[in-house]
Image (cartoon, grey):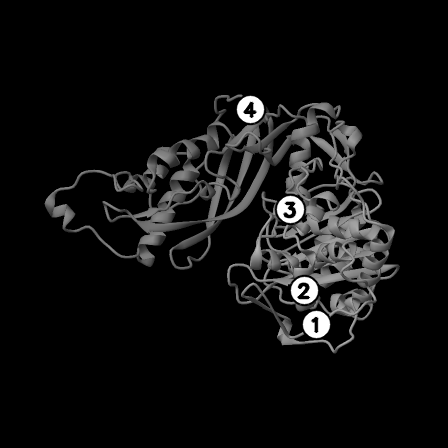
Amino acid sequence: MRSGAKVAVIGGAFVLVAGGIGYGAYSMLGDTGDGGGGTQSASESSKVKTGPPSAEEIAETSKGFFDAWAAGDASAAALLTNNESGAEPVLASYGEDAHIGKVQITPGPATGTKVPYTVKATVAYEGKSKPISYASELTVVRGLTTGKALVDWEPTVVHPQLTEGATLKTGESSTPAIEAVDRNGTVLTKEKYPSLGPILDTLRQKYGETSGGSAGIETWIEPADESQPDVNLVTLSKGKPGKVQTTLDAGAQAAAERAVKKFAQASVVAVKPSTGAIRAVANNPVTEFNVALQGKQAPGSTLKIMTAAMLLEKGLVTANGAAECPKDAMYQSRSFHNLDHFDLPDGSTFTQSFARSCNTAFIKLIDDTKDDAALPKIAKDVFGIGLDWKTGVVTTDGSVPEEVGGEAAAQYIGQGTVQMNVLNMASITATAHTGTFRQPIIVPQSLDDRELATASRSLSSSVVQQLNTMMRATAAWGTGAKAMGSVGGDKGAKTGSAEVGGQDTSNSWFTGFSNDLAAAAVVQSGGHGGDAAGPVVAEVLRAGG
């Protein structure tokens, strides 16, 4: 983390730009969120307003707050919020610690009680200055005791990335900047590859001091949680960045960025099966919480890759053997059915059930396994799920808890208590493709000699061959055919959909491989796996890497 020593404000940190109603007129209107605030006489109390603030009140309050903030009067601005004690130190640090001045705030039209606005200002420190601009919004509420219209205080009012307990600072960074490069030496920046922003911040925190660089002058957000990386906002002086090698591929990353932007909420990861090297990570929207690497949700039928491996290992099915696929199946009083209650004719093979994503074909084989823990065992022993992956950044390993009865049955088709993210599913696909788990990494192991996770065993060559046969069928003529039609090379796939929390439209999941690249994607509320997540995976696979 950074030392970020405080220094006094130098020469006129703020200038009042907005005119109109002065903030001084509101200096007695403060109110606290817990019902506190100044005392009132009986006559005053009888005049306290209730109900939502009017449009006029919203305009006047927000304007007064903006005027005070722009003028650098933290006390007056804080008095116009419903949490004076929480707001004042944050507003004061804007000039004192972050050295942000010449503030211009331009409000947009209010939508209900919300007022959007843009901030344009200048960061000035030790003779160096740079502009800073961003957009945020505030909400105007009625004070609990005064009845006055007040700004509902949140740190995001000052900056959209500012969280509770975090601070804005400008000064010499204690951690040198890094120049992250892809596997071919191409420089990776958050400006060109927005999804990499949180990853690059983490790599800087972990490897900046040992990468050979020197400190620069920056404006950053320092999180309250010291384990989280600082968020760099402005670089006034670069210093000398240290070089950090990654396993990423700029071409695959660019394709991943383009693909996820086609949906409101989407994530994708690509992994090289022969090495575990992560080639691309992308999310839309981009947040500090990296959904692709840290998310936890049911992956739907994409998990049938793992279930199929378990059934094949136990000799309960073969790729070309018959597998019953009725419209519905019951297991311990819990009913399961296929999409639109389809079925397959007698004599259909397990490959056909896999390629068509037949739930009941899997459910009807549960009794034959005679072991509710069979799926959790293979998840850990073969696919490396839950082995504490050390990728180089924060990731979640996925989870297949031991369950019994109907809940265990739901796991067979990727529902119930199974929790995965697209990194996990890309790794599961990579393991199925080669037969051996190779822990995903985003920086070489040699960078810090960390111990990588290793699974206790591999799949047999027979099981690997059959899994690949079934995935190839899915890509050729099964549920993944449309999405994978544009992908070349030796290719395979598996589709999935999963409903979480009773949502109206299921999440779309898709995973696949092309030659020595595996990728998995999820599109929230995207519907069938091949419709939304499939094209995301296909675009990344086409880029290679």
- Residue sitting at the far bottom: 345
| Residue behind mark 3 | 398
Q: Which tag is nearer the camera, tag 1 or tag 4?
A: 1
Q: Which tag is nearer the camera, tag 1 or tag 2?
A: 1
Q: Which tag is nearer the camera, tag 2 or tag 4?
A: 2
| Residue behind mark 2 | 532
Q: Identity of the amino acid at label 4?
A: Gly
Disc with the residue nearer the chain's start (2 vs 3): 3
Q: In the rendered image of this protein, does residue 371 appear above or below residue 301?
A: above
- In the displayed structure, does residue 357 sit left or right of residue 502? right
User: Crowdedness of circle 3 by 10 Å Cα count: few (<14), some, many (20+)?
Assistant: many
User: Crowdedness of circle 2 by 10 Å Cα count: few (<14), some, many (20+)?
Assistant: many
| Residue behind mark 1 | 325
- Pick whichever, 5 or 266, lies toward us: 266
Task: Look at the image and tell me whether residue 13 can be seen.
Answer: no
Q: Identity of the amino acid at label 3?
A: Gly
Disc with the residue nearer the chain's start (1 vs 2): 1
- Pick whichever, 80 or 231, lies toward us: 231
Q: In the rendered image of this protein, does residue 464 appear above or below residue 360?
A: above
Q: Circle 2 — which element?
A: loop
Q: CA separation, marks 3 and 1? A: 29 Å
| Residue behind mark 4 | 4
Q: Identity of the amino acid at label 1?
A: Cys
* Mark 1 and mark 4 residues within 8 Å of each other at the beta carbon: no
Q: Which tag is nearer the camera, tag 2 or tag 3?
A: 3
- Pick whichever, 159 or 404, lies toward us: 404
Q: CA separation, marks 4 and 3? A: 37 Å
Residue at (59% x, 63% y) in the render: 525
